[in-house]
Image (cartoon, rainbow, N blue to C red):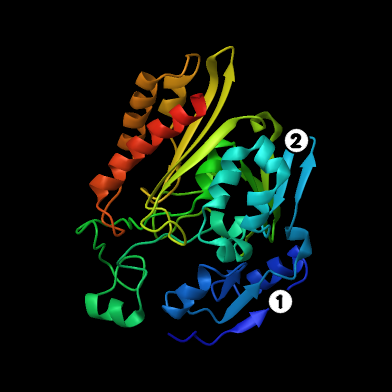
């Protein structure tokens, strides 16, 4: 499958990139690592006139400790996140999530910002143009029908990135640059839970930095991922957990899920259930039930919705019990 025709724009500063996005609003597609975008271009899911290549903006790379916490440039590679001494020590749930994205080659190419802004996926959407013509188009691309929820007016394409649930557990915030300056938004408020318009970011805006608060440092954390193959595959369900314990009890607990809804979601009822109590198997089972009820998988992937929901329950229980050891 060949790439569509486009012109590459190569800014060397954030301000220049924002100007170019504004000039070509609606006609430009941002490319960072390209590990997700290039296959989508080959499938003709996007046919932009311009590709805005961010690789020349050095200010968007790097991990630095500041008084308020950790600051990560949006172009920082997933490999750098995976191997960062600071992240592995202070924010282990993020290191674990980054370590299971794709394969080593894809993690070298892929960026944290790209993973946060990943397009939603569906077996009806992520296909070649010829396949989509034969099977009819969908709400997300060129049609008016959702094939996984017939009769519905909402797109249920699934958000399938690994690092956002970990970032949600850490209370991450995003810096977004645009023609009106930079704004800061909590990651939990960034997603819409709508498959064909998953982010609250305008076409002339750009994700520049990710902030992890100092208060989230030191949380125990882990990430569990369901996929068919042991590498390369997107998650078909994912669970991130971060805990802080004091004197044998849970001082704070945060759990987020991915790949079973059109957005990654925090599960606040798990926090309410676990906080202030010693973690045991009974509570871990109850937390799994809550997480499974939050999951709303449909037939957007190769595995059945029922199995994916059940695995959210199982992975939640296992993750919590592993941390409690």
Which residue sits at x=67%, y=29%? 215
Quarter-of-image position of residue 89: top right
Q: Residues within 10 Å of mark 1 (few under 14, many from 20)?
A: some
In the depicted structure, whether residue 190 falls above or below residue 270: below
- Residue 69 at x, y percent in the picture: 73, 37
Q: Quadrant of the N terminus?
A: bottom left
- Residue 257 at x, y percent in the picture: 43, 42
Contact (CB < 8 A) between labels 2 and 1? Answer: no
- The numbered mark at residue 158 is none
Which residue in the structure is indicated by mark 2? 68
In the depicted structure, whether residue 186 falls above or below residue 219: below
Quarter-of-image position of residue 60: bottom right
The Cα atoms of the two marked residues, 2 and 1, are separated by: 32 Å
Q: Residues within 10 Å of mark 2 (few under 14, many from 20)?
A: few
Q: Nearer the viewer, residue 59 or 321?
A: 321
In the depicted structure, whether residue 51 falls above or below residue 35: below
Q: Secondary structure at mark 1?
A: loop
- The numbered mark at residue 10 is 1
In the depicted structure, whether residue 227 falls above or below residue 31: above
Which residue sits at x=24%, y=63%? 147
Q: Nearer the viewer, residue 246 or 141?
A: 246
- Residue 206 at x, y percent in the picture: 64, 60
Q: Secondary structure at mark 2?
A: loop
Which residue sits at x=28%, y=67%? 144
Q: Residue furthest left?
A: 151
């Amino acid at each position: 499958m060949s790439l569509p025709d486009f012109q590459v724009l190569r800014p060397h500063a954030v301000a220049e990139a924002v100007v170019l996005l504004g000039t070509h609003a609606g006609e430009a597609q941002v490319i960072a690592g390209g590990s997700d975008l290039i296959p989508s271009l080959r499938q003709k899911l996007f046919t932009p006139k311009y590709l805005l290549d961010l690789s020349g903006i050095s200010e968007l790379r790097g991990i630095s400790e500041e008084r308020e916490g950790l600051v990560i440039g949006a172009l920082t590679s997933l490999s750098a996140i995976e191997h960062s001494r600071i992240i592995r020590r202070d924010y282990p749930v993020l290191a674990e999530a980054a370590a299971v994205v794709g394969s080593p080659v894809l993690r070298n190419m892929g960026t944290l910002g790209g993973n946060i802004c990943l397009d939603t996926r569906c077996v009806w959407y992520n296909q070649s143009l010829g396949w989509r013509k034969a099977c009819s188009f969908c709400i997300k691309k060129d049609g008016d029908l959702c094939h996984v929820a017939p009769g519905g007016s909402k797109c249920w394409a699934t958000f399938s990135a690994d690092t956002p649930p970990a970032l949600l557990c850490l209370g991450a915030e995003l810096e977004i640059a645009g023609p009106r300056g930079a704004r800061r938004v909590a990651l939990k408020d960034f997603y819409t839970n709508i498959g064909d318009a998953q982010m609250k970011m305008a076409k002339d805006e750009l994700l520049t930095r990710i902030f992890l608060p100092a208060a989230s440092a030191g949380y125990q954390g882990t990430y569990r991922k369901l996929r068919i193959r042991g590498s390369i595959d997107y998650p078909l369900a994912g669970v991130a957990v971060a805990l802080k314990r004091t004197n044998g009890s849970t001082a704070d607990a945060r759990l987020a899920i991915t790949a079973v809804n059109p957005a990654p979601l925090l599960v606040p009822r798990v926090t309410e259930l676990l906080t202030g109590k010693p973690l045991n198997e009974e509570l871990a089972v109850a937390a799994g039930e809550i997480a499974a009820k939050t999951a709303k998988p449909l037939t957007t992937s190769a595995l059945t919705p029922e199995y994916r929901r059940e695995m959210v329950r199982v992975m939640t229980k296992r993750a919590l019990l592993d941390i409690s050891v």
